[in-house]
Amino acid sequence: MRFPEFNGKTVFVTGAGSGIGRAQALAFLENGANVVGFDIVGKGLKEIFQQYEGQFLFIEGSVSEKKVVEEAVQHALAEFGRIDILLNTAGVLDGYAKTLDTDEALWDRIMNTNIKGTYFVTNAILPHMIENVSGVIVNMASIAGLVAGGGGAAYTASKHAIIGYTKQLDLDYCREGVRANAIAPGAIQTPMNAADFAGDGAMAEWVASETPAGRWAQPEEVAGLTLFLASNAADYIHGAVMPMDGGWTIK
């Protein structure tokens, strides 16, 4: 999928160390963008992105630490001069824990990464976008932000919050040149879901059988949708939540 318009633009991707975030980073690099990958773990990224030297910058850190986020954004601006697209992709699961099985530490870990982390990164980059009267934000929601069963109590709550935050974000700043949307993936085969494929893979097979499309998707498919949502072709799409779930939520 080619979008020449991304050539020379700068994309800031959280959760770029693996899964969907890594696929998004590669997709934009392949389309000529400068990419800043931000993640708590960067193992193996240097080798993966070595052909994009001068085009890719990795910054290690957690989205849940405000000062670290602000420093990362300043580093990115010093390196590339601007940030045109923000992909808030970093997130963690809660093991499908019900509320009575969710202690405060787990609740805080999920909320601090999934929703507060999105808030920290957005607020660090948004003023720059407003100053340029131009910017696109794509937040990573989940089918757990639309229906129950996609996660436990904390994860489901956090992804519902992401959807509400995305809608309000777009409403508040679209007249200032900033457009925000969210993607709600279903079963995507990433390291985050490795437990489903463990052992005999029975859980992964069950998920595929319960998905109308009959399979898991790959991170590259989510990256393709991200390219479209960030492109000029999607300029009239505002505050939308785009399910990418193989039909899970139509059941």
Image (tube, grey):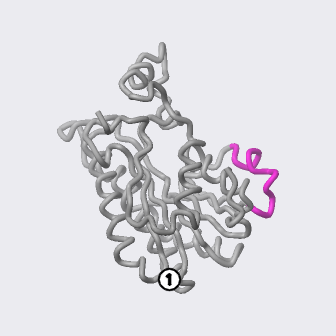
Q: Nearer the viewer, residue 102 or 33?
A: 33
User: Visible in this render: residue 168?
Assistant: yes
Q: How many marks?
A: 1
For disc 1, the neighbor class at 10 Å (few under 14, some 14 to 19, many from 20) is some
Residue at position x 54%, y 74% from top?
Answer: 135
Q: Is residue 164 left or right of residue 1?
A: left
Residue occupying the point 68% across, 69% down: 9
Residue type at mark 1: give it: Ile
**Residue 159, how many percent across, how many down?**
33, 51
**Residue situated furthest left in the rendering:** 100
Looking at the image, which residue sits at the far bottom? 131
Which quarter of the image is occupied by the C terminus? top left
Q: Where is residue 92 drawn, in percent x and y?
A: 42, 46
Task: Say which of 188 and 100 sits in front.
Answer: 188
Locate residue 70, reporting x and y percent.
52, 73
Callout 1 secondary element: helix
Instruction: State which region is magenta.
Output: 44-55
User: Going by the image, does 198 lie left or right of 156?
Assistant: right
Question: Which residue corresponds to mark 1?
Answer: 130
Is residue 121 within the magenta segment?
no
Say above or below: 110 vs 10.
above
Residue 106 seen in the figure: no
Tell me where residue 130 appears, x and y as whole percent. Answer: 50, 83
Along the line of sight, which residue is nearer the eye, 8 or 71?
8
117 left or right of 33 in image: left
